[in-house]
Image: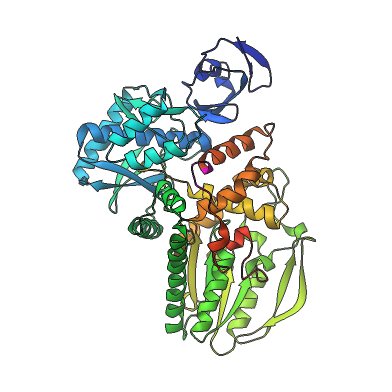
Amino acid sequence: MLQIILPDGKKKKYPEGTSLAEIGRAFEKNFDSPLAVGIFNGLEYSLHFKITEDGSVDFIPLNSVEGMRAFVRSITFVCVVAMQELFPETKVEVCNSLGSALYCTMPQNPLNHEQLKQLEAKMQSIIAEKQPIVTFPVDRRDAIEHAKRDPYLGGDVLAMIQMAPESETLYAYELCGIREPFFGPLLTSTEYLSAFEIIPFEKGFVINYPETNNYRELPPWDTVRRINRAYEEAEDWSAMVGCNTIAKLNRFIREGTADKIIRMAEALQEKKFASIADYIANHRDRIKFVLIAGPSSSGKTSSNQRLCVQLEVNGLHPLPISMDNYYVNREDTPKNPDGTYDFERVDVIDIALFNEHLQRLLRGETVQLPYYNFMTGRREYRGQQIRMKENSIFVIEGIHALNRKVTESVPNENKLKIFVSALTPMSLDALNRIHTTDLRMLRRMVRDSRFRSHDALATIRMWPSVRNGEEKYIFPCQEEADIFFNTSLIYEPAILRKFAVPLLKTVPKEEKEAYYTACRLLRLLQLIEPLDEEAIPNNSILKEFIGGSAFAKEL
């Protein structure tokens, strides 16, 4: 008999081979939705997983962030199976998320709108039949041989198998007789996947799926074409240079040729900054304010500084302004229902004062800029004054910079709005992508540790609040942007591994939810070859997070 620590902290003995689903039946009533996956000793598993040693068990419901990730992996599998049954010559490639939807392309033999309707109907049929999704361990040698025989997924899957620790058990999933590997557990049945739709979009289609709080309800999907183009541009470029998956990046690192990838990635970003600066210079008669916004850890500050350098090359006089300095005093900061400060809302900014200053600058008046002291939680004035001169461009950076209220006093013709985010084009293989939110959390974790004396636990705890604020106040404004700028670098997962792994290992088991997140990220990072940061130029956006930036004084 095995001794298991249950979610309520109690200990109970179970026979070896008991599944997580069997243990979970006693705890289903504690959740507002069905169980999606189980946790055993900190790692996520399908509910089919059978325990073979002592340990601790917990569960993740469908109505949760991790539960919805399992939903998305499962509906992707249903799509793959339906596609293979109806159109075996067509292959699905998962690209990126677009709101509450997953954008997929079909590199081989793409389907037309009528065929996509047939695909959706077949998926609905599989779901209605409540087909089981079977999980089973795979012998490593068998997995390698299977990957070698797969002309589509084989190369990348093989490389991931070889990077996985020898001690790790590999799993495959089977639905309707079709087997596929997935990085992360799936649901045990299709019965909870009925809320979805296939929508033709761009070069392929999106799978629209529920939001985190209700797995039964399908929200309307808003087209977000411009940010998808930023994703596509990154994916096309990374594929062009032969580095669009972790397996390919690992090969460059092992062969000692990663320096070339670093130089090309940095050169591409510099080229984009120069292009934006050229556009501003060509429209200097009307553009007076450049607004740079984006979610947490998107590289807004470094983007600001690098754009300013390119503006100077064009003979302009950039004047950077950080919206953080316009925070209201701590006692005036809005609060959450639980009494904690809500630093994500737009009204943490003194909007009236900010607009007054913008109007005065536009009139050519001198303005004394505030400085926000984060230690005391109060605005101060330290004698910094600015005013518009000939060829002046005010470059304003802040998470709410694209919110209309924040700059409502300035005519639109005088503004250029830029939205920056880390839209990673990297994936593990055609079906398993790396989440942009994971990349940004790793960036923030490393930065918080190196510059803000926060440990990984503090960053992980804070992340849900950060994400909630982004969904409410930042992403709804992204379509206001004139330009989308992708700050991700295809080599950065290998750099972040070196810094993030030691931090993630400090998260204590007692902090259950944070520990699960840490274990999941550690499992991802262990598939990536580490890369030394010496070859990274000191003006790189990544230096904002790992240290050594040429803009350190400004940052």
Is residue 373 placed above or below 235 in the rendered structure?
below
* Residue 213, x across and y down, in percent: 51, 37
Residue 339 x/y as whole percent: 73, 46
Which residue sits at x=44%, y=74%?
276
Q: Nearer the viewer, residue 494 or 45?
A: 494
Q: Nearer the viewer, residue 179 or 205?
A: 179
Q: Nearer the viewer, residue 487 or 103?
A: 487
Residue furthest bottom as drawn:
390
Determine the residue located farthest toward the right in the rendered image. Answer: 376
Q: Is residue 482 visible?
A: no
**Which residue is rendered at x = 41% and y = 34% of the image?**
182
Point out the image quarter for the C terminus.
Answer: bottom right
Q: Position of residue 181 (x, y in %)?
A: 38, 33
Query: Vertical placement of 277 versus 167: above or below?
Result: below
| Residue 169 in view of the camera | yes
The quarter of the picture where residue 89 lies is: top left
Tell me what residue is drawn at x 22 percent, y 31 percent.
85
Q: In the displayed structure, would residue 272 be above or below residue 188? A: below
Quadrant of the rendering where the N terminus is positioned? top right
Magenta residues (range): 525-530
Image side of residue 449 versus residue 112, left or right: right
Q: Is residue 83 left or right of residue 296?
A: left
Question: Which quadrant of the figure has residue 347?
Answer: bottom right
Magenta stretch: residue 529 in it? yes
Q: Residue at x 74, y 59 (%)?
A: 332
Magenta part, dominant SS:
loop
